[in-house]
Amino acid sequence: MVFALPVLLVFLLFSWGPIVKGLVMSLQQTNLVDPVKWVGLENFRYVLADPAVGQATVNTVWFTLLALLFGFPLPVLLAMFLSELRGRSWAYTTLAYLPVITPPVVAILLWRFFYDPSPNGMFNGILGVFGLGPFPWLDSPHSAMPSIVLEATWAGAGNAVIIYLAALTSVRTDLYEAAELDGAGIVRRVWHVMLPHLRGVLLLMLLLQVIGTMQLFTEPLLFTGGGPQNSTLTILLLIYNYAFVNGDYGAATALSVLLAVALAVLSAGFQLATRRWSTE
Amino acid sequence: MSAERGLLSQTDRTRRRVRVPFVIGQVVVFAGLLVAGLGPFLWLLKAAISPTQDSIRKPLALFPSGEVQWQNLGTAWQQGHVGYYLGNTAIIAAGTALGSLIVCTTAGYVLSVLRPRWGSVLSAAILVTLFVPHIVSLVPLYLTVLKLPVVHTNLTNTFWAVWLPPAASAFNVLIVKRFFDSIPREYFEAARIDGAGSLRVFTALVLPLSRPILGVVLLLSIISSWKDYLWPLLVLTNPDLQPVSVALPKIAKVTELNIQLAGLFLALLIPVALFLVFQRAFLRGVGLSGGIKA
């Protein structure tokens, strides 16, 4: 059983181990200086009393909602359209996937330049032609988060397009044929054949997107550092600050556990709700 | 009979009310994707060889001052050390890919071909990690790398710290196992009757047959390691070991804009080239990930 050795070692050290350790650490005081001490729920109490946690939660949920609003329908529509191009869609998918290939750090530094708030800035210059702006983008607490959503949508859409396209190739085309013979127009074929076929993938991608966006980190760190006025401080950024700025590993893991539990409850509720809905 | 058709039938496609919006839609979508997908890349190429003032004052104009600074690329590579950091990124990506390949092929072999009695337990234990958000293990993973259990070694500021953790990927193990499942069982029996041991079956039969899926794992792990930022930032504090993603924000703080943008362009060039060359494998891999998730 030598073959099982690599997977066992790697998962024990870097996957199963840290998960268990995370749960344990949330009940301990760990700062690498003093000896480790059991503190019960003290870390949770500390975290829940920190006003920054409330702010970060509101920001993170706000980001998630905005990202759903802009980022979820776009790839679905794009994939539906591209699947009708059949053989010729490769040029489109290649273009759509280029932002996904772009390393996030490169994309963020580039977009930070695009978001230059001066009237000469890239985006302000383009919008200025239409008489709009100049907008402050990342410099205002109101528009900083939407600006991050815009970049994140650009960076993530291509991936979802490819997944939907793959799902669409397995629609039985005779169903379209039958629907058409029964007199169903294009819109009704989309509604009654295409979307029901996609339902499983759509629901799953919805859930995965929420789980992903709730863990937003690199964008606010590099775009704004959480500002202005903490308007882009996310839960993950706060965890990072707890652990690697303050050295309070207990608080950091406690907040991580809280977030993970929230996500687990959310997924379970989501699964339950959609299961009932799809059996109806 | 319906030959190749999609949502739209041949009759739809000849109808004017469908054809005209469809063609207009194609033009609009293609133009949109061109701007969103290729636009930033082309702009970055232009800005990388433009003087700073051109990029700031008239970002949309093509060389308004008439000066083309090809030397920016060289300066970013040499003085900006982008070349050096890209080398680190390449070393990190190569090691990560190798580690991932070793773990997922051997694990796939155990779970799909050897099938020991405890295989189902192992399989479930791996599967379960797919459902645990990464965030739970970020801090404890950092402390693990800081002081490895049992041996008490500190892996930070060694490449091992970035090579090993990504190898614990349930996703890779699963797609490889699924691929191994599709190899006909008769092959293994025939090989065994011919007297091949499990090592020989693995190296001479399973690995050569699974080249396509190994290519997918290789590409996906190279790209994800290339894109990674937070983890190398945490565990590689020594600037000599840092990958380009960690170095770029620091370079951005101390370097003039034209050199900065040239550095961004250089950092983007290799992933884009890799993608364009291995496009098919990439898109298949992403499609596969949809299949696993569904």
Image (cartoon, helix red, strand yellow):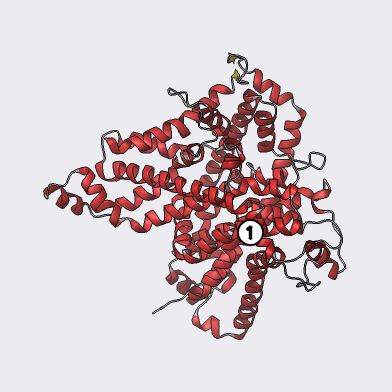
Residue A91 figure quarter: bottom right
- State how many labels appear: 1
Q: Tell me if I can see residue A42 in this picture.
A: yes
Residue that carries the numbered disc 1 in the rendered image: A73
Provide the secondary structure element on which disc 1 rests.
Answer: helix
Q: Nearer the viewer, residue B87 or B164?
A: B87
Residue A157 seen anywhere in this rendered image of the structure: no
Q: Is residue A280 above or below residue A172?
A: above
Locate the N terminus of chain A by quadrant: top left
The amino acid type of the residue labelled 1 equals Pro
In the rendering, at what x and y percent does residue A158 appear? 58, 60
Compared across the picture, whether B59 is left or right of B93 comes to: right
Residue A70 located left or right of residue A168: right
In the rendered image, the vertical position of residue B142 relative to residue B266, given as above or below = above
Residue appearing at x 50%, y 32% in the figure: B155
Judge the density around disc 1: few (<14), some (14-19), many (≥20) Cα neighbours within 10 Å. few
**Label 1 marks which chain's residue?**
A
Q: Position of residue B125 (x, y in %)?
A: 40, 35
Which residue is drawn at the image coordinates 47% and 23% (left, top)?
Answer: B152
Q: Nearer the viewer, residue B158 or B278?
A: B158
Q: Residue at x 71, y 57 (%)?
A: B259
Q: Where is residue A60 shown, x and y percent of the image? A: 70, 41
